[in-house]
Image: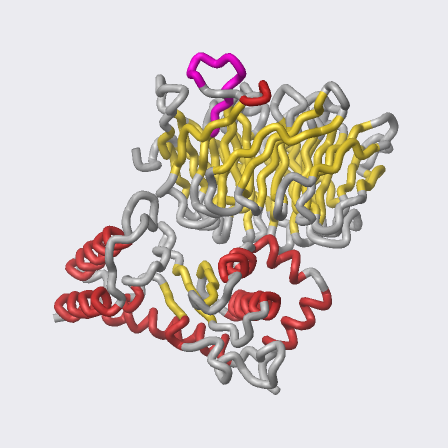
């Protein structure tokens, strides 16, 4: 297979941002999209008939580049992480989107923000090398539950496990770390460090079961990690009675530049990547491949998806095959993938 | 005639730069294998008359344009240009698909033939932040002035700096660069170095 299976059709190009667009995030219900970038704005797009249109522009929320936006699982809140070292939380309770909470504490640029599925935890990470876990109290109150200084460099991304309150982080120190709350003393601890990438790990994506993780890196590869629980039949040791994660597949030779983002569709199982060579790639697991040694093929490669680096990709959580992407070329694009 | 010239150029480069089997460079290919593949691909191109004198000339002009932009960048510390101080030099500018650099560990053009520009520089002082600053100036100057599409990698000359890997990583991380350029003091410093004219 040479990346020519299926069809990735451009549905619409969303114009409006000025300069680099760093991130895009679909609303959990699938009919709204938020994007953010170096123009310090968040743009919210919604469906109007068969087209997507700009609904709101949130300016003045941040003083510097907005690096990532994330909708809460309930869909009522939008968090934004900024180079101005703050994380803003927006909601529409008043009828209009307003910033009703600002999370401060990081020493410098906040790179990523993510909501736990359970809905009462938020995580942020920064160039200050730390990962912060916040507890959502009532009425727009956020309390810092933990400051985790496990990484030795800039932390690029945080993602929560799809079902459990387990947090994964990706760093400039080339590693991925897992964190969870220790029940005995309510302290958050680092329970795993995944070492294999040879350069900065830019992003992460869990599969729908949460037993697999995909990571992408400046080393031009994508790695697939498999969870092994204590008592596993494969004979993998699990010290400290914690699950162990092993790299079971490395996709190399496909990306010619840094891979900035990765998204694993929980509906179709397809993996999409955003790369600095302007290409969006879609990978598919080979049917019946050994779970301990899976095979993935490059299913589709969309050349010139953008005219500059692709910074982010995300599969729509509700509509199978619908994909959003953003780029240094200031554009946000919506695509439909069909097999 | 052109094919013969090309072949001879490639063979000379290979000898000059001593291509041998080293640790894998691209995926599982060794350096030598990658080189052979590149030679094969280029030869095939030649035979189908794709790579011709005009293209070679185009690459050369592109390299000259790039060098013209970076040679006059002022050194952050000394009242001299990067060229004066031999921090940047013509040979330090490499463009993918350029015959003269097939032998080097140049990353190939992207699949869509967007040129990859690789710039090597030699910081005068083994001071980490100054070297980073120079790398930043080179990048910003080119990103602002080059019209053609390109991807850019900037590296310190091997063996000239104890923390060269750290510096190289920083000056090629676009998120770090973007954040740095939002710092007004740093931005002013860079602007001061890259401003055209006296």
Residue at 34% across / 48% down in the picture?
B26
Whether the magenta-drawn stretch holds residue A228 is answered as yes
The residues colored magenta run: A225-235
Left or right? Give the position of B193 relative to A228: right
Q: Position of residue A147 (x, y in %)?
A: 74, 37
Q: Nearer the viewer, residue A108 or A35?
A: A108
**Is A71 rendered above or below residue A84?**
above
**In the rendered view of the protein, which quadrant contains the C terminus of chain A?**
top left
Magenta: main secondary structure equals loop
Residue at 66% across / 53% down in the picture?
A38
Whether the magenta-drawn stretch holds residue A152 is answered as no
The reply to whether residue A118 is in sight is yes
The reply to whether residue A12 is in sight is no
Q: Position of residue A17 (x, y in %)?
A: 64, 51
Q: Position of residue A318 (x, y in %)?
A: 59, 23
Residue at 53% across / 17% down in the picture?
A229
Q: Position of residue A194 (x, y in %)?
A: 52, 34
Left or right? Give the position of A27 relative to A174: right
**Is B28 rendered above or below residue B100?**
above
**In the rendered view of the protein, which quadrant contains the N terminus of chain A?**
top left
């Amino acid at each position: 297979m040479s990346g020519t299976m299926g069809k990735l059709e451009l549905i619409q190009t969303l114009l409006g941002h000025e300069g680099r667009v760093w991130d895009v995030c679909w609303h959990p219900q699938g009919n709204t999209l938020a994007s953010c970038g170096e123009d310090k704005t968040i743009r919210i797009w919604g469906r109007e008939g068969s087209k997507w249109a700009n609904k709101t522009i949130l300016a003045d929320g941040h003083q510097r580049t907005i690096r990532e936006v994330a909708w809460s699982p309930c869909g009522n809140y939008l968090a934004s992480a900024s180079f101005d070292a703050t994380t803003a939380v927006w909601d529409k309770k008043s009828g209009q989107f307003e910033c009703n909470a600002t999370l401060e504490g990081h020493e410098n640029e906040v790179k990523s923000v993510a909501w736990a599925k359970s809905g009462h935890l938020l995580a942020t990470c920064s160039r200050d090398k730390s990962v912060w876990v916040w507890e959502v109290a009532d009425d727009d109150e956020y309390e810092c539950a933990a400051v985790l200084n496990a990484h030795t460099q800039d932390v690029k991304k945080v993602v929560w496990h799809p079902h459990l309150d387990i947090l994964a982080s990706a760093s400039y120190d080339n590693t991925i770390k897992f964190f969870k709350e220790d029940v005995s003393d309510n302290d958050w601890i680092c329970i795993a460090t995944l070492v294999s990438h040879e350069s900065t790990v830019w992003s992460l994506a869990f599969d729908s079961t949460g037993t697999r993780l995909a990571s992408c890196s400046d080393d031009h590869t994508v790695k697939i990690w498999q969870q092994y629980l204590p008592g596993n039949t494969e004979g993998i040791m699990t010290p400290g009675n914690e699950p162990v994660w092993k790299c079971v597949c490395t996709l190399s030779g496909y990306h010619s530049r840094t891979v900035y983002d990765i998204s694993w569709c929980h509906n179709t199982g397809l993996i999409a990547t955003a790369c600095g060579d302007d290409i969006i790639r879609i990978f598919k697991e080979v049917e019946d491949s050994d779970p301990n040694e899976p095979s993935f093929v490059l299913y589709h490669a969309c050349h010139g998806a953008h005219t500059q680096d692709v910074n982010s990709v995300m599969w729509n959580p509700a509509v199978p095959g619908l994909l959003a992407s953003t780029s240094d070329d200031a554009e946000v694009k919506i695509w439909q993938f069909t097999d | 005639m052109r094919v013969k010239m090309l072949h001879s150029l490639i063979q000379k480069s290979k000898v000059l730069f001593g291509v041998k089997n080293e640790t894998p460079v691209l995926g599982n290919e060794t350096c030598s294998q990658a080189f052979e593949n590149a030679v094969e691909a280029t030869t095939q191109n030649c035979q189908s008359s794709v790579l011709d004198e005009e293209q070679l000339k185009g690459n050369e002009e592109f390299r000259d344009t790039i060098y013209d932009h970076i040679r006059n960048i002022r050194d952050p510390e000394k009242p001299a240009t990067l060229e004066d101080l031999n921090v940047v030099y013509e040979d330090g500018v490499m463009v993918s698909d350029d015959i003269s650099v097939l032998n080097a560990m140049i990353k190939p053009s992207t699949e869509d033939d967007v040129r990859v520009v690789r710039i090597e520089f030699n910081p005068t002082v083994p001071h980490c932040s100054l070297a980073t600053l120079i790398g930043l100036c080179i990048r910003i100057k080119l990103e602002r002035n080059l019209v053609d599409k390109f991807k850019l990698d900037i590296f310190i000359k091997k063996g000239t700096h104890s923390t060269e890997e750290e510096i190289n990583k920083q000056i090629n991380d676009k998120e770090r660069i973007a954040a740095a350029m939002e710092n007004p003091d740093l931005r002013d410093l860079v602007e001061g170095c890259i401003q055209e004219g006296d």
